[in-house]
Amino acid sequence: MTFQVFGDLPFTTAMARAAGIDGARLSRAVAEQELARLLLGVYIRNDVERTPQLLARAASLVVGAGSVICDRTAAWIHGVECFDFQELDGVPPVESYVLRGRRATDRPQCGGGTRDLQPRDWMDIGGVRVTTPVRTALDLGCKLPRRKALAAMDALMRIHGFTRAELVAELPRYFRRRGSVQLRQLVPLVDGRSESTGESWSRLEISDRSLPAPVPQHWVHVAGVPTYRLDLAYAHARIAIEYDGEEFHTLPEDREADERRRAWLREHGWIVIVLTKDSFTEDAIIGWIGELRRALAVRQAA
């Protein structure tokens, strides 16, 4: 019951100390999964639901007054995880910025600086300024490596429902900003129908090689009923690209269901190319892109 004093709200190390809870007790509670460390020096009971409002409130405990939460921390609050696995082994800093002309925070939990932002670029979540999903997508399109950037932008569009036209309308503001060339290349590719990082990466590799764009989440109808949904498809050519992520394709029953579905598709004239997390090395990409080229050529010649 020690941590019930904070209710369902996040709290800092200093707040815990004021309540008579020392650092050793906090560390033990994290190890025993009684608490979760949300940010550097910020904790929450493990049974509390992580809502955007709660995550924003957690960030508010470490950002300075007048700061705007941006980039990967903003994406995290908006429901999209962009931090690297090695960062998640520790606690990544809060990425926040202040408006140009103001002094950036020097708190150790925060990273950032100054940035040109307008009032339409942020929203209030739990009393904290957080860049909007559109602004967050654009900033990550400049900042992250290409694959990760497109996956994050796809996910933000999928969750929050903004349009590609909204992204395009903001591009002139990014002229000459570092990463703006990459951003202009990625915006036309953003598609909220992609449902996984692997699907986004696959679409990017296909685009980079000037191949036609497949359609995400295509339904195959059987007797007029939508029965099989394909990750990526060239429906006219009956070519499917399936990404088997670890979350939904590792259990024996999952693999059996995948094989039954793909057997039916192949029996009915589909070419099915299966990708996994190991399909994005240089050699692996050459292999499956070559397979896709050949499949498209065969269908075009038929």
Image (cartoon, rainbow, N blue to C red):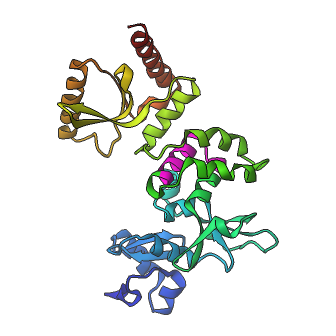
Where is residue 77 shown, x and y percent of the image? 50, 65
Q: Residue at x 61, y 43 (%)?
A: 187
Where is residue 194 shown, x and y percent of the image? 43, 43
Between 140 and 26, the one lying in front of the other is 140
Whether residue 10 sits left or right of residue 3 in the image: it is right
Q: Residue at x 51, y 81 (%)?
A: 12
Q: In the rendered structure, which segment of residues is drawn in magenta? A: 141-157
Whether residue 101 sits left or right of residue 97 in the image: it is right
Query: Is 156 covered by the magenta stretch?
Result: yes
Any part of residue 144 in sight = yes
Q: Does residue 5 sit above or below 201 in this rendering?
A: below
Instruction: Farthest residue to the right: give it.
Output: 101
Whether residue 106 sits left or right of residue 10 in the image: it is right
Judged by its main secondary structure, the magenta piece is helix
Q: Quadrant of residue 198?
A: top left
Where is residue 219 shown, x and y percent of the image? 30, 36
Q: Residue at x 58, y 53 (%)?
A: 137
Where is residue 227 shown, x and y percent of the image? 22, 36
Between 86 and 199, the one lying in front of the other is 199
Q: Residue at x 75, y 48 (%)?
A: 178
Total marks in image: 0
Instruction: Farthest residue to the top: give it.
Output: 301
